[in-house]
Image (spheres, rainbow, N blue to C red):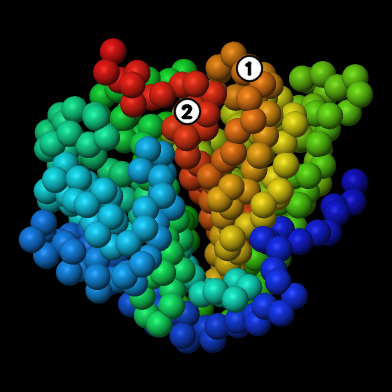
Amino acid sequence: MIKIEDFSTGIPMESNTKLIEIDPAENINNKRHIRLLLKQIAESNLDDLLIKISNAYHEEAEIKAFHPINDLKGIENIESVYWRPLLKAFPDLERRDNLFIGGSFQNNIFVSAISHLTGTFTNEWLNVPPHGKTIHLRTCEVHQIEKGKIIQSHILIDTIDFMRQAGFWPINKSLGVEGMWPGPITGDGTTFENLDKNLSTASLDQGLKMQRSLNIKPENEEGATKESIKEKLLDHPQIEFWHPKMMWYGPCGIGTARGLKGFVAHHQLPFRLTFKDRNYWKIGHYVELGDGNYSMTAGWHSIEAIHGAKDWLGYEPTNKSVTMRVMDFYLHHEGLIRENWVPIDIAHILYQIGVDVFELIKK
């Protein structure tokens, strides 16, 4: 088996950066505290919305959000550009968390979540017309905390999945299966209270080592064919990490895959063929967390790549350089990675290659 290279996957730090190591009990308190504040925002009314946001966020906090919201700074912009239109569109909105984890990375403290914001789609949002029915907005977040409040958030709402539920399908057919993401098979995504530092470290180490294995690229070998690449991906160092019953939950447009064969067929092989020229860690992860049997990493942007083929998402190659907003959440179960939830801002990637999904639904 090919040896997996060892290298740093995080954003480079200044030499004098003071690392933070958070106590597990403090991490539990952070998760409870921030989870309550986020629920209060999502379930507030328009009259007290700014108060609820002020309770959760520092005055000059920043949000790095999904396309087309993108970057916001200050609680007034967070309220007026992000939350107020969302609550107008879904007046009965509620927050349903599937996974809530936390910890420290480098010199910062974080909590991170996979949730659904559920409500009746009553008024237009992002130029999508309402149908008056239930929508589950698939939402994945990372929040950096300072003195009990959020100083920076990264938020990915799956806007393509939102369109799908609203009755629109503006992109090519997915290779995987579309549908609502389930919570962890262990059923403890929001109830576990881990105090074992070693377990958290081991979970993160396993996730990072698997990610480093992805830097082994059979698609770039001389004379490689689609079939030979597929065979090498099924006999790749990554097999050391994946559970036989692994589930890979991709964003809408890619869909869900089961087992290594499904993962390779529905996402990994098409992705590698389309983006042969790519760098996973040119910028590096801004967060890497291990929390009990869970871990997560995220980059903004962690991947830069050249759009060189049509296998992934089905669009003719543009040879344009694109960046990707990606998060990875892992359940480590029975000694292996059992589940992997992977939010990717597909609308943002498509926009970079000249496909504006928000304009397409108007036609």
Q: Residue furthest left?
A: 47
- Determine if residue 95 is in view: no
Measuring 69% from the left and 68% from the top, which residue is drawn there?
13
SS at mark 2 in the image: helix
Amino acid type, callout 2? Tyr
Q: Residues within 10 Å of mark 2 (few under 14, many from 20)?
A: some
Nearest to the observer: residue 339 or residue 149? 149
Q: Amino acid at mark 1?
A: Pro
Q: Compared with residue 264, is residue 27 higher up or lower down, i.e. above or below?
A: below
Q: Name the one closer to the observer, 141 or 320.
A: 320
Residue at image point 62% right, 18% down: 318
Circle 2 is placed at which residue position? 351
Q: Is there any visible trace of residue 164 in the rendered image?
A: yes
Q: Please say if the residues under marks 2 and 1 sit with CB atoms less than 8 Å apart.
A: no
- Please name whichever residue, 160 or 65, is drawn nearer the observer in this view of the structure: 65
Q: In which image quadrant can residue 39 be found? A: bottom left
Q: Position of residue 239 (x, y in %)?
A: 75, 46
Relative to 220, say whether 135 is above or below. Answer: below
Q: Quadrant of the C terminus?
A: top left
Give percent across and percent down for residue 286.
59, 60
Residue of label 1: 317
Q: CA gap, disc 2 to disc 1?
A: 14 Å
Would residue 193 be found to the left or right of residue 48 on screen?
A: right
